[in-house]
Amino acid sequence: MTALALALSLALGQGYAPQRQGLDPLEAEKEARVMRLGKQLRCAVCQGVSIADSPASMARAQLDKVRELVSEGKSDQEIYDYFIERYGEWVLLQPTTGGLNSVLWLGPVALLGIGLIVIVMQSKKKRAVAPDAASAPVSDGAAAPAPSTEDALLAQVRADLEK
């Protein structure tokens, strides 16, 4: 019985999206502007969908608010500011590049630049060390370099292994 009630409620609830809240339709040009603005604002319920594309009742109410603000003659920026004031900058599907967001936009580029600088400096350092070692004169055994402590340790290990 519970399964039947659940199936019936799902079947009846499919595709339900409340209609506009009694606002008169706008001219085609203004309605196109409402849809363009609605495509830039994030639905608070669906989160990855714009309010123009979302079937959620909250998104419909937000789109009606956009329609109302457009009919009042507000500019695009004033409408964005209205929603940012109420929901925060999160409401914009395309975040701004100013303020603290500039760190997020420029951070990867800066890290890539720093990484390239480190790689270039390391490769220059290795090139500078390599020719010095290669240009060292090779002796014919006349003057052998003094054994280091590592060579003495290696000789001791070899002697122990031969026992």
Image (cartoon, grey):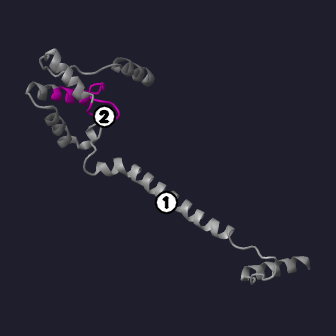
Q: Is residue 35 left or right of residue 147?
A: left
Q: Does the segment drawn in magenta span residue 142?
A: no
Residue type for callout 2 = Val
Q: Which residue lies furthest to the left in this view?
A: 72
Determine the residue positioned at 10% across, 31% down: 74
In the depicted structure, whether residue 121 falls above or below residue 84: below
Task: Give the x, y percent position of residue 40.
Answer: 26, 31
- In three-dimensional space, the C-alpha distance between marks 2 and 1, rounded to whole angstroms, equals 45 Å
Task: Give the x, y percent position of residue 25.
Answer: 14, 16
Task: Give the x, y percent position of residue 103.
Answer: 32, 52
Taking depth in this image into account, of 5 and 78 the one nearest to the observer is: 78
Give the foreground label among 2 and 1: 1
Residue type for callout 1 = Val
Q: Identify the residue position indicated by label 1 in the image.
A: 118
Q: Identify the residue position indicated by label 2 in the image.
A: 45
Region of the chain picked out in magenta, as a range: 40-66
Quadrant containing the C terminus is bottom right
Q: Does the segment drawn in magenta span residue 53?
A: yes
- Of mark 2 and mark 1, the one earlier in the sequence is 2
Q: Is residue 12 left or right of residue 80?
A: right
**Residue 48, picture quadrant:** top left
Main SS category, magenta section: loop
In the depicted structure, whether residue 157 falls above or below residue 53: below
Q: In this view, does 90 lie to the left or right of 128?
A: left
